[in-house]
Image (cartoon, rainbow, N blue to C red):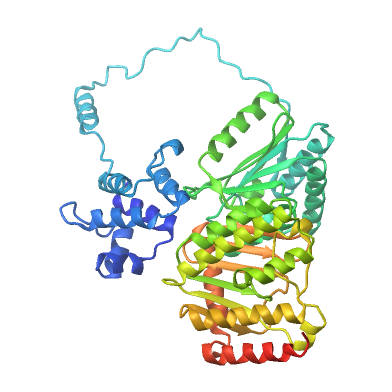
Amino acid sequence: MPFSHRLNLLMNTLGISNSRLAKVLSVDASLVSRWRTGARTPAKANTHIAEIASYFAEHAKMDYQKTALCEIMGLPADKCVKDTHKLAELLYSWLCDESMPDTKIITRFLDNLGTFKATKSPLPPVNEEKSVPAGMTLKSEVFYGIKGKQDSVIRFLSAVLEHKKPCTLLLYSDEDIEWFAGDRLFLASFVQLLIKVISKGNKIRIIHTINRDMSEMFAAIDFWLPLYMTGEIEPYYCPRYREHYFRRTMFIAPGIAAVLSTSLFGWEKNAANLFCTDPRLIESLTGEFNEYLNMCRPLMRIFTSNSSPELANLLTEFEEQPGDCFVLSNSLSAITMPERLLDRLLSRAGADGMTKEKMLSVQRARYNVFAANLKHYNYTEIVFLPSPDEITAGRIPVELPGLPGGTALCYTPHDYREHLENIIGLLNHFDKFSFFICRRGPNLKVHLAVKDETGVIVTKTDAPITVFAFNQQNMTNAFYCYLEDFINNIPQAERDKKKVIEKLSSLAGSLSNEC
């Protein structure tokens, strides 16, 4: 593999742009571009390759990033290197290794070619009496084309429903999603069958193809969204996936049935789709899927109301990561809530003493990390502010995932004023804390938090409360760019810190009479 391919792998894996790497190396971005296309290759004698290796080793701060770097170097998952210095050494050796062919092979080929004589048979004689091997006859059905793929999948899901014992379905496809997304009638049947499959106790493990166009990728996620919210789907992606001329679909229900198809890209309308119930073939496909799964990483983590401890750990871990952070919400965030207010809300929600202490402890830990990061990184909260009448009417929900039993609470005027006063204090105390006032966000019931080069947390704030956490770099970049554009559309007056403080103080003052 040439240097250009290796550099592209590194930069795509960690989402590093040409301009960012050029700035680190103090070179022109056009030179990095030429390295990536193969037009130029840095000489081993200069320091550029060593500097590149050191930068990527230091940039990979999280374990999953270090694991990804080790994976692209071909190291086994259990041999992941966590030490930055050692990782830099390995990256340097890997970048310098051009994998040149063994010259002895060329020498042997030339010698054989030079001594070859036309009368000499290049192959051993064939034993004509030897019988032709026969394969095993399989119990299978073939469906052709797009309609055939749809029929084979319906056949597959029906076989799963007929089976009494639930299993974990293994799904993968890098073929065009048009076969299910482009036909609304089929899509409705497909979704209904999947819901029935899950309701019978089956689970799904799916490997997504993230190298699709971003709009196509989000369309696929949007399709799976209702099913994700059941908590019964594990989504993955392969960071080393590369597009090929041939595409593949594997739907496997171990021990029950499988659908398999391979098509030349653009030839899906004529592809053969094999539905089979042969145990040995299903076992072989299951093994192949699991080997591929070993190369994959979770595309997202999904938390429901039943996963409060894991969610608390995620939120704390997210706060701990360095980097600028954007938050978009239609309610004030939990991180800016004073502890005394949280204590009061937990009591109102009926939390027992142990639950209350755990949640207050998590809040303290998150706030301490939040305050420490504000010394070096920007934290921008983009929030819709309701009218005093809406607050007084008790219609403004408290954004606090993890409340006992998924309890829904609304602010009293006193609660809301106390929270506003705490935000004003943060704005006055931290230069890097910003609070932007926007019109109602794109969705009243969604909270979005994005941290550059770390990940995304999307929270559905009404029942059933569900939290989605992404850390795949392309998706993180997409959400980050979305929030940057969103901010640019907010009037400057609603972003000016002094004017924002005046507006918050005015709203807090108007609530004093209601307390």
Q: Quadrant of the N terminus?
A: top left
Left of 147 or right of it: where is 133? left
Q: Which residue ends up furthest to the left in the rendered image?
A: 45
Q: Residue at x 71, y 26 (%)?
A: 278
Q: Quadrant of residue 391?
A: bottom right
Q: Position of residue 196 (x, y in %)?
A: 83, 46
Left of 251 or right of it: where is 189? right
Q: Position of residue 53 (x, y in %)?
A: 29, 53
Q: Check the image and report above or below for 371 versus 270.
A: below
Left of 467 or right of it: where is 131? left
Q: Nearer the viewer, residue 125 or 142?
A: 142
Q: Nearer the viewer, residue 218 or 51?
A: 51
Q: Check the image and report above or below for 211 versus 170.
A: below
Q: Check the image and report above or below for 276 versus 388.
A: above
| Total marks in image | 0
Q: Position of residue 72 (x, y in %)?
A: 40, 45
Left of 207 or right of it: where is 466? right
Residue 94 visible in the displayed image: yes
Residue 496 visible in the displayed image: no
Q: Residue at x 59, y 48 (%)?
A: 236
Q: Residue at x 57, y 33 (%)?
A: 288
Q: Check the image and report above or below for 202 versus 51.
A: above
Q: Quadrant of the C terminus?
A: bottom right
Q: Quadrant of residue 410?
A: bottom right
